[in-house]
Image (cartoon, grey):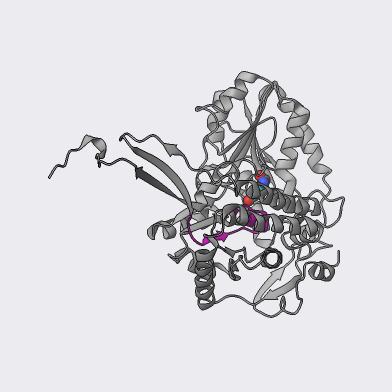
Amino acid sequence: MDIKDIFSKLGLDEKSLNSGSLEVFTPVDGSKFASLKTDSAADADTKIAAAVEAFKIWRTVPGPRRGELVRLLGELLRKHKESLGALVSYECGKIYQEGLGEVQEMIDICDFAVGLSRQLYGLTIASERPGHKMREYWQPIGPVGIISAFNFPVAVWAWNAALALVCGDSIIWKPSEKTPVTAIACQKLFEEACKQFGADAPKGLSQLLIGERDIGEVLVNDKRVPVISATGSTAMGRIVGPKVAARFGRTILELGGNNAIIVAPSADLNLAFQGILFGAVGTCGQRCTSTRRIFVHDDVYDALVPRLKKAYAGLSIGSPLDAKTLVGPLVDKLAFDAMEKALAKAKAEGGEITGGGRALADKYTEGYYVNPAIVEMKGAADNVQEETFAPILYVFRYTDLEEAIARQNDVPQGLSSSIFTRDVLEAEIFTSEAGSDCGIANINIGTSGAEIGGAFGGEKETGGGRESGSDAWKGYMRRMTSTMNYSKALPLAQGITFDT
Ligand code: UN1
């Protein structure tokens, strides 16, 4: 792949990509491919002010017309799917197929948002007073701040941006400092969509803040931004959440996961095998929905776990741009160090490790390729409480479903979970009030690769936010309750009399 060619297909100007101090490296081989000008706090202030002005105009544009802008964005994404997918692959290291998948996810949410633009429904509510009616309106709320992570550098922006835009909000995006070039590409496509849309797309509707954590903090602390949607680590959320709460802003937090799969005795083991493999080694274990733990019933342990180990030994690890590759690199050395540390800890605790360690180090001295690892945890009481953003799969045995569910839930995070079973009662228990405590609880599919139609997010240290489908759009609007009196009297609610 020729990165210069990709730049030119996406209308990115090479000179401006090499005009500043923020160095951007590709995980493919660790080489630097851009150095970007960063925004200062003063720049951020100007951009936020512009987003406020744009919001004042955009909120008055009818919802379905706002949907048209998102439709145009979706069309441009279709047109540029291959080049943007390749840039995603190059900048964050996921394999090209997954880069394409990520752009598809953007297209899908645009389609969803276009339909939604005609369905921003509020309720009508029965009033307790004669001659009165109550109505609920959903109104645009203001500029929405979007903080995204390196592992889904563009799709997560689109989930937030497409919804916020049809909801009548302007958007301000702080992408990960590891993946700002894809953000610039998206911003360009958005600007092109605005051009095609016409004059009622206000200038400054979408703002991009390039820089490190300090610039994210400016956004988080700014009270002109009523909603901050942040995706990333629990550590990041612990900083962002209280800061936004302190100014009574709203957060939509999508943080860490510690996702588990339960494999029951009746499971279709071929499905379980495929679901676990993709969940655990896909994206080199760097999805927030990646499968981190599996609980395998004693009866099927020996039929499944050795097969997984064998598959791990034969995985094609290599450049994410190579069509044969299934496992690309970790994003950087820090990620590799974290994986090494987690494996050392597991070993010290008696875990039996298959795989692990660096791969292709001779070929890519600065690219952090690894052998995905399986860790068999022998002790029944063991659990793994931390999320390590790397392909480590912890394997546990179980005998009793209730106990397996309890252990699955016994972690600080609550994002994604699944069970492989053909026993309908087990499946129903898993999704019952006493079952999985996660935001996502799947049956006979793995933990990762959620569709955009459902609300995405989870409980506990995952942050509680919901993005993407279902009624997640309500997080991007303010709810107004309006009581209308069409009578000639003024009865008070609660039966109060207040005669003068
Ligand atoms: C993330 O890893 O931040 O379910 C999001 C999935 C994707 C989104 C993952 N649709 O794996």
The correct choice, above or below, for 226 with respect to 435 in the image is below
Callout count:
0
Relative image position of residue 9 (x, y in whole percent): 81, 67
Extreme residue in the left direction = 500
The correct choice, above or below, for 45 with respect to 169 in the image is below
In the shown orientation, is residue 349 left or right of residue 459?
A: right
At horizontal 57% and vertical 28% (from top left) the residue drawn is 431
Q: Is 391 contained in the magenta span? A: no
Identify the image quadrant of the C terminus.
top left
Q: Which portion, as a residue range, is magenta?
A: 140-160
Residue 421 visible at all = yes
At horizontal 75% and vertical 66% (from top left) the residue drawn is 30
Relative image position of residue 101 (x, y in whole percent): 75, 50
**In front of the other: 396 or 82:** 82
Q: Name the image quarter holding residue 89.
A: bottom right
At horizontal 84% and vertical 48% (from top left) the residue drawn is 316
**In front of the other: 150 or 471:** 471
Relative image position of residue 231 (x, y in whole percent): 57, 54
